[in-house]
């Protein structure tokens, strides 16, 4: 005789519901949450039907128990408990992969931008000082007046100094000028390395010969007797070094400027998203509310867009007096994309508020009401 109490309900559906109920029961027991005895009884009784044909009453009790458990333990769910048990390594590996890939790009370019910016600023200052010295030396050693001669009509064997100027002062200026040339050349070669030797070194042939390199950038021993020749030679060398350095400055400004303004903000925004997701993952794991979501991929895309356009808003600061660097602003935009899009929406509203504002109704002026003067007393009496 067939058992009428047994109903061939979906075993897979009920098996999943039973596993979810047991997960919630276990979490409640571990967390010290008091559960109604009827709920526990329904879940334990449902285990007896696992793998077989379920009775209708047992299935209904199980679903009722699962509903009450889910409501009591909210926001913890059976899905989040399963994910916290099975998914942490996979999620950490995914976030770690994103962070490592971003770091491999951000760190070299950030270091390159910082170092090249420092070299370029130092070269700019040295060129300014060297230009002044070059003009001063040429004016001192090549006076516009006539050549001074000694009484017997022969030219002076030593250098001719303008009045009030000593040889020691000119030698000191020449030494400072030569030191600036060496400094500019050194920093320019460092910049050329960061640009993968894009510019041709004007002194590449002399680099491998220490003696030629010494003669190229050092002052000659017979300096006091050949001041004009030494100064002229230093000026020629300085012009070559200056052209080399300024060409590299333009290349660095173009390449690393494009990277700093276009690429790095996007990467820092993506890094900010990684930081946000890792922080959310840590909090959700502690609360047992972590659930993997495909929305995280969309958040990366939104962060990339935010980082790409955040440079257009120079006045987007946290407070009126605070100033945030562009890359830090891109990181914050990626970390809190909701805040950034709230800023965009408020900006759009500020543009449309004036256009859409209703016109104030114009109040029509009415002529003043005429007031009938009271009748005289005599007239009132006559009428009576």
Image (spheres, grey):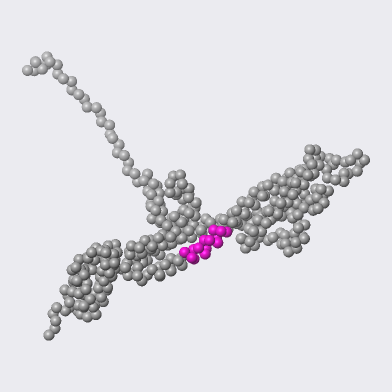
Query: Which quadrant of the figure has residue 10?
Result: bottom left
Residue at image location 40% in from the left, 47% down from the top: 351
Residue at image location 80% in from the left, 44% down from the top: 167
Instruction: Judge from the rendering whether residue 199 lies leftward or rightward of residue 75; answer left or right.
Output: right
Can see residue 349? yes
Instruction: Judge from the rendering whether residue 94 lies leftward or rightward of residue 138; answer left or right.
Output: left
Image location (x, y in percent) of residue 57: 16, 73
Can see residue 10? no
In the current view of this chain or complex, which residue is farthest to the right? 152
Residue at image location 14% in from the left, 18% down from the top: 375
Image location (x, y in percent) of residue 96: 45, 66
**Taking 44 as reference, is 338 above or below it?**
above
Query: Which quadrant of the figure has residue 144?
Result: top right
Along the line of sight, which residue is nearer the eye, 167 or 357? 167
Along the line of sight, which residue is nearer the eye, 36 or 65? 36
Numbered range of the magenta stretch: 99-112
Query: Which quadrant of the figure has residue 33?
Result: bottom left
In the current view of this chain or complex, which residue is farthest to the bottom? 1
**Taking 123 as reference, is 299 above or below it?**
below
Residue at image location 47% in from the left, 64% down from the top: 99
Image location (x, y in percent) of residue 53: 20, 80
Image location (x, y in percent) of residue 198: 64, 61
């Amino acid at each position: 005789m067939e058992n009428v109490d047994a109903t061939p309900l979906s075993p897979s559906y009920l098996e999943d519901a039973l596993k979810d109920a047991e997960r919630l029961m276990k979490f409640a027991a571990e967390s010290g949450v008091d559960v109604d005895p009827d709920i526990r009884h329904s879940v334990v009784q449902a285990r007896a039907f696992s793998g077989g044909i379920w009775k209708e009453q047992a299935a209904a009790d199980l679903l009722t128990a699962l509903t009450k458990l889910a409501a009591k333990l909210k926001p913890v769910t059976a899905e989040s408990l399963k994910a916290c048990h099975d998914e942490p390594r996979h999620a950490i590996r995914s976030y770690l992969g994103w962070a490592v890939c971003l770091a491999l790009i951000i760190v070299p370019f950030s270091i390159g931008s910082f170092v090249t910016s420092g070299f370029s600023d130092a070269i700019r200052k040295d060129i300014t000082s060297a230009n002044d010295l070059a003009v001063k030396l040429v004016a001192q050693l090549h006076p516009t007046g006539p050549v001074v001669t000694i009484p017997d009509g022969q030219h002076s064997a030593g250098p001719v100094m303008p009045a009030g100027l000593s040889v020691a002062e000119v030698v000191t200026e020449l030494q400072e000028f030569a030191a600036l040339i060496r400094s500019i050349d050194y920093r320019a070669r460092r910049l050329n390395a960061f640009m993968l030797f894009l510019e041709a070194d004007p002194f590449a042939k002399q680099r491998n010969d220490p003696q030629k390199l010494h003669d190229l950038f050092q002052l000659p021993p017979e300096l006091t007797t050949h001041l004009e020749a030494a100064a002229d030679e230093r000026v020629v060398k300085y012009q070559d070094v200056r052209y080399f350095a300024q060409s590299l400055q333009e290349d660095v400004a173009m390449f690393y400027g494009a990277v700093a303004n276009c690429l790095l903000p996007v990467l820092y925004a993506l890094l900010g998203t990684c930081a946000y997701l890792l922080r959310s993952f840590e909090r959700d794991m502690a609360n047992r509310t972590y659930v993997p979501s495909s929305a995280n991929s969309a958040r990366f895309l939104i962060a990339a867009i935010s980082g790409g356009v955040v440079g257009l808003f120079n006045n987007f600061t946290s407070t009126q007096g605070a100033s945030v660097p562009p890359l830090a602003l891109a990181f914050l935009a990626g970390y809190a994309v909701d805040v950034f899009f709230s800023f965009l929406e408020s900006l759009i509203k500020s543009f449309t508020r004036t256009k859409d504002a209703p016109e104030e109704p114009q109040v029509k002026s009415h002529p003043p009401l005429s007031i009938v003067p009271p009748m005289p007393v005599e007239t009132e009496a006559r009428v009576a």
